[in-house]
Amino acid sequence: MTKKTCGAARVADVGAAIELNGWVNRRRDHGGLIFVDIRDHEGVTQIVFDPQHPAFAQAETLRHEDVIRVHGAVRKRPAGTQNAKLRTGEVEVAVAELFIHSRSTVPPFPIAGDEAVDENLRMEYRYLDLRRPRLQRNMRLRHNMVKAIRDFFDDRGFIEIETPMLIKSTPEGARDYLVPSRLHRGTFYALPQSPQLLKQILMIAGFGRYMQIARCMRDEDLRADRQPEFTQLDVEISFCTQEEVLELMESAMKFAWKRALGEEIVHDFPRLQHADAMQRYGSDKPDLRFGLELREVSEIFASSEFKVFRAQSDDPKGAVIGVRYPGGAALSRRDFDALTEVAKQFGGKGLVWIALGAGETKSSAAKFMTEENVSALRSALDAQTGDALLLFADERSAALAVAGKMRNEVAERCGLRDPQRFAFAWVTDFPLFERDEETGAPTPAHHPFTAPRDDQWDLLDRNPLAMRAQHYDLVLNGWELGSGSIRIHNAEFQRKIFALLGISGEQIEDRFGFFLRALDYGAPPHGGMALGIDRLAMIAVGEENIRDVVAFPKNQAARDMMMDAPSHVPDRLLRELSLQIKDETGK
């Protein structure tokens, strides 16, 4: 008797006696014969119960998701009954013996297929959801991708080092999850948002090439590509240039894609400067699977009677931005009204549309649009008869942002975002600082450990907002996969950055003293990157929500529906941690 998985039996095994263990996937009673599909993590095999065998009576009681063991002989399926969709589809097992490991109650949703199910119900019964074909496939591809990444970096001489989960709270752009200390009353650990300072310290410690598949936590509002806890590929290198980091990470992605997906990426990833990406796509994570580049058309309205557009054309900070809608002339006025509401949801003031019909041109601002305006717009946006033009007037960055979101909306409606195509790109030359919307003060565009370009340190005291960073993002199909930078390795320069950000000397010592002391002991130039494993797997398998590539995710409200967490704890535990729970009024 040979023990096999449920995806292993082949024609070569005909006549062999085998043992199978698994779940009842389907059960069918056909004229005295009972057919059962038995399923495990490797696949499905059809087994047959004959009325002449004692096991037949037991088989009549089997239900979906019962767990069974069978002994029997492999035989060919009768001609015409083969199932080409199964790897085992040419054979079946004639059962001689059946043992029922455990019974299943009726599942709350079908397991054998991938029918749509309410997400909260899926999260509550995640152990059942994970049995379904889609999530089984997703988890296996994720495993294959992570293994490929580890193999790649091992071949490149990297060492994987685990960093701690209980660390000091340091500002990294999102709220920390805090863990109260029982032994040191009134103090807290933080769960790491990333191993940023720790991996830099590993470079100071002389390891040279570090990588880690790291678990990270951030207490932030959730969306389709975020979870409170997530996994990232973390990489750091000593004595490197930005170009060396880009080459390394690009090669890693090509290797992982070929190993996990069987798809070879032969071309180099295109590179876009941040300002160019914003001007052409209205986003620093552009989707390059399609064109529809944005165009600034302000000059066309420099002498227009259309006051709204002319005002933005005259304003040095304003702009009129256009995007082409292929085939959009066929839309009705009601369709264009709906598009206008979408633009408002994206933060726009609205939009002006022009439909380039074969017989006539229509527009929401027809009385202000001259033939010369329309002709110039058609040329600027490479539009054809049958297309529509969408125009946005506002402060330049706001107009670009709304137009960029509408570009993606148009592509989605026109079916231009091919899920089978993977368009990687680098975005580089980011600003080092941004202006805080509330205070107007400089704030890091990435994080305060990012180095500016080597020739720009003199701008720190006189024009910090003009400084460009040695910072780079890898994007894929309109998602940011991850970010990286060359780091500041000089303690004096790092202190200057902290001071510019308004961090007092006392605060610097309290939050970062350990790190600055490490820099004082001879720090090599270094840089690195972190890529989101969850997001990478999500795009690779064609999902639209990160929860479908995470085994035990939280729902949109950050709750674990299966374990019912977060949950209350006994008062005794709170007292041990010197904690007291107050209501919203503070009582």
Image: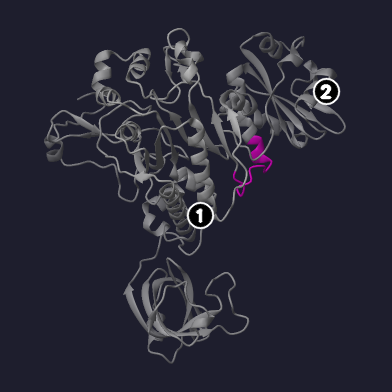
- Give amino acid for label 1: Ala
> Which mark, residue 375?
2
Q: Is residue 245 visible?
A: yes
Q: Earlier along the polypeptide chain: callout 2 or callout 1? A: 1
**In the rendered view of the protein, which quadrant contains the N terminus?**
bottom left
Helix, strand or loop at label 1? It is: helix
Q: Tell which of 97 and 505 is nearer to you.
A: 505
Identify whether 195 is placed above or below 133: above
Dot 1, how many residues are within 10 Å of its Cα: few (below 14), some (14-19), or many (20+)?
A: some
The one of 113 and 475 positioned closer to us in this rendering: 475
Residue designated by label 1: 260
Q: Main secondary structure of the magenta part?
A: loop
Location of residue 367 with respect to 389 vertically, above or below: above
Q: Is residue 544 visible?
A: no
User: What secondary structure is found at the residue carrying circle 2?
Assistant: helix
Placement of 128 over or under 8, stated as above or below: above
Q: Residue furthest bottom?
A: 52
Residue 75 or 497: which is nearer the viewer?
497
- Colouring used for the render: one colour
The answer to if 46 sits in the magenta stretch is no
Q: Give the quarter of the figure containing the C terminus.
A: top left
The residue depicted at 39 percent of the width and 71 percent of the height is: 22
Q: Which residues are magenta?
A: 409-422
Q: Residues within 10 Å of mark 2 (few under 14, many from 20)?
A: few
Quadrant in the picture for residue 203: top left
